[in-house]
Image (cartoon, rainbow, N blue to C red):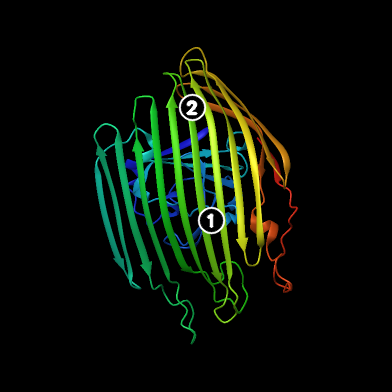
Amino acid sequence: KNVTIISSKQIQEYSFNSIDELLKLVPSIEIQSRGGFGNQSDLALRGTTFNQTLVVLDGVRVNDPLTGHFSMYIPINPHEIYQIEIIRGAGSSIYGPDAVGGVINIVTKSFSNEFNDDELILESKIGSNNLNSINMYFSKKFGDKLNTTISLSKIKSDGQELYNSLENIYSFFDHQLFSISQNYQPSKKLSLNFRYSYSINDFNSQYYYTRNPFDRSSEKVKKNWAQFNSTYKINEQSKLVFQNVYKRANDLFVFNPDFPPFNENKTDLVNNKLYYFKKSDRYNLVYGLDYQSRKINSIDRGNHDDFYFGSFINFVLKPNQGDYGFFLNPSIRLDYNESYNLQYCPQIDLNYNQKNYNLRASFGKTIRAADFTERFSNTNKSTILPYRNLGDPDLDSEKSINF
């Protein structure tokens, strides 16, 4: 596949305030920012829309079931990143729904099982409009088995005045993050990883979603993230991996302080993955199971819950002569959700690699699942104003053929 890898060493050479600002520096990635400093950004790969690119953190998806606009609320400090893998092209045959244009996989230092350096990084910035930030990352290895990282960050500003009026509207923002993670290896065969993160993104969001003259909106997104990985090394060639994540997001959207009630959306997500990986000189093999449980409690969207189940297999046949020659990579995935029923995503990738050139061909099917906003927006209101959008609870998945 067409993959670009950005290492932590490269990341430290850049100047940025948030992960979306970092990705903006990478060719072929389009970041559509509604506001700087990590307020809200949409990510697009290869001409897809913002909700057709999948963001993955240490193997589990970040994309929020409430709305595609939350994909860049990644609950880690940028200094925690070990490497960023940008996988261009269709990926639904392995990663499931939403991987239409590609996948952004973020691997952190504490989950990589390869990084165990002692580090202390302190960073502070000041600027106009009362901009100030502080950023702290600490990593410490205790003996041969335990590695701990702690991250704190805060960046805020009063913002600049947006309009010459008597209303004194400013583009304020206040973003805060706390993250702690552990890497524990009780034996040479077993590795355990754990992370807990809590983040708050509070910002002016006027005209982010509407051009309504009464729009005086602000938004506050709170996110709790708990993640657990366990890796059991069966032998030198194979391993078994179990991944679990629980995410709770609280989104408070105030369209106009004079017009209550305000839209508050609480979303719960549980994602479990179990897969087996085997690697040899002639082939790589991965197959596994994926389960998600999703729930929303919302003023304007109502209360809903659903789940989806997926299974996949991915095979890579390598050439006899090492790194050069033909690589054949077929894969297929089955997904079930009550909204779009059973979907299958087959794909085949062919690669001819030589010392001075590389030829790739790919053909596959991708899907994108509708989020809760597309399915249930304003369905819990008795009166729908003319400028409001109404969701469709029975909205099917998007389907496309990528080649």
Image quarter of residue 17:
bottom left
- Crowding around mark 2 (Cα neighbors within 10 Å: few <14, some 14 to 19, many 20+) is some
Query: Where residue 127 appears, x then y in whole percent?
Result: 31, 68
Q: Secondary structure at mark 2?
A: strand
Which three-letter amino acid code belongs to the residue tagged 2? Leu
Query: Where residue 132 appears, x then y in whole percent?
Result: 32, 66
Q: Is residue 185 above or below residue 80?
A: above
Left or right, 5 with reference to 286: left
Please state which of residues 112 and 133 is positioned toward the viewer in this rendering: 112
Image quarter where the C terminus lies is: top right
Query: What label sits on residue 70 in the rendered view?
Result: 1
Image quarter of residue 331:
top right
Q: How many marks?
A: 2
Residue beneath disc 2: 240
Query: Where residue 284 appears, x then y in whole percent?
Result: 52, 21
Q: Is residue 57 above or below residue 170?
A: above
Left or right, 17 with reference to 385: left
Q: Is residue 22 above or below residue 229?
A: below
Can see residue 337?
yes
Identity of the residue drawn at 61% across and 70% down: 210
Can see residue 31?
no
Residue at mark 2 to residue at mark 1: CA–CA distance: 31 Å
Query: What label sits on residue 111 in the rendered view?
Result: none
Residue at the top extreme?
320
Residue at the front extreme?
186
Query: Where residue 209 appears, x then y in whole percent?
Result: 59, 67
Q: Secondary structure at mark 1?
A: helix
Which three-letter amino acid code belongs to the residue tagged 1? Phe
Please state which of residues 116 and 401 is positioned toward the viewer in this rendering: 116
In this view, the mark in front (2 or 1):
2
Q: Earlier in the sequence, mark 2 or mark 1?
A: 1
Q: Is residue 112 above or below residue 180?
A: above
